[in-house]
Amino acid sequence: MIRGIVRCGNTPVPFARIVVVTGPGPMPEIAILSGPDGSFTVGTPYPGRYLLAVHADEYRPARLEVTLPEASSTAEVVAALETLPT
């Protein structure tokens, strides 16, 4: 499982789109939204390396590489977004 929060500085970014771009094994396309507090949880069926893409309106997209040593482990991550220039 990958659990995290999307932030810009210390401010949570609500309703950001988190997409699992690649994973260590065959899996369906996974896309979720962060909650009102910026938090999210992604179920991960396999151990290994995952690449997440994070998008939110008015912010630069970000990518996170996360490695899970075991299928039953949980990784805690922070997706740090930057505002787009005006």
Image (tube, rainbow, N blue to C red):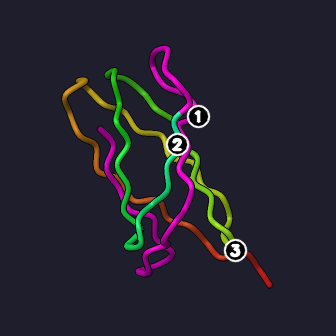
Residue tagged 1:
21
Residue 67's x, y, as percent? 36, 33
How far apart are the two marked residues, 3 and 2, measured between alpha carbons? Answer: 19 Å
- Residue at the limit of the structure toward the left, as seen here: 72
Which amino acid type is marked by label 2? Leu
Q: Is residue 3 above or below residue 22?
A: below
Decide: is 56 above or below 30: below
The residue at the point 31 percent across, 31 percent down is 68
Range drawn in magenta:
1-29
Q: CA distance from mark 1 to mark 3?
A: 21 Å
| Left or right, residue 59 beside residue 75 | right
**Does the magenta segment cover residue 16?**
yes
Q: Quadrant of the N terminus?
A: top left
Residue type beneath disc 1: Val
Q: Amino acid at mark 3?
A: Glu
Residue that label 3 marks: 58
Q: Secondary structure at mark 3?
A: loop
Which SS class for mark 2? strand
Please name the residue that numbered disc 2 is placed on: 52
Residue 54 on image: x %, y %: 57, 54
Question: Pointer 2: residues within 10 angstroms few (<14), some, or many (20+)?
Answer: many
Sequence-first disc among 2 and 1? 1
Q: How many marks?
A: 3
Camera-side residue: 53 or 31?
31
- Please name whichever residue, 14 or 50, is drawn nearer the observer in this view of the structure: 14
State yes or no: discs 3 and 2 in contact (Cβ < 8 Å). no
> Measuring 45% from the left and 19% from the top, which residue is drawn there?
24
Q: Looking at the figure, which quarter contains the C terminus?
A: bottom right
Along the polypeptide, which appears first: circle 1 or circle 3? 1
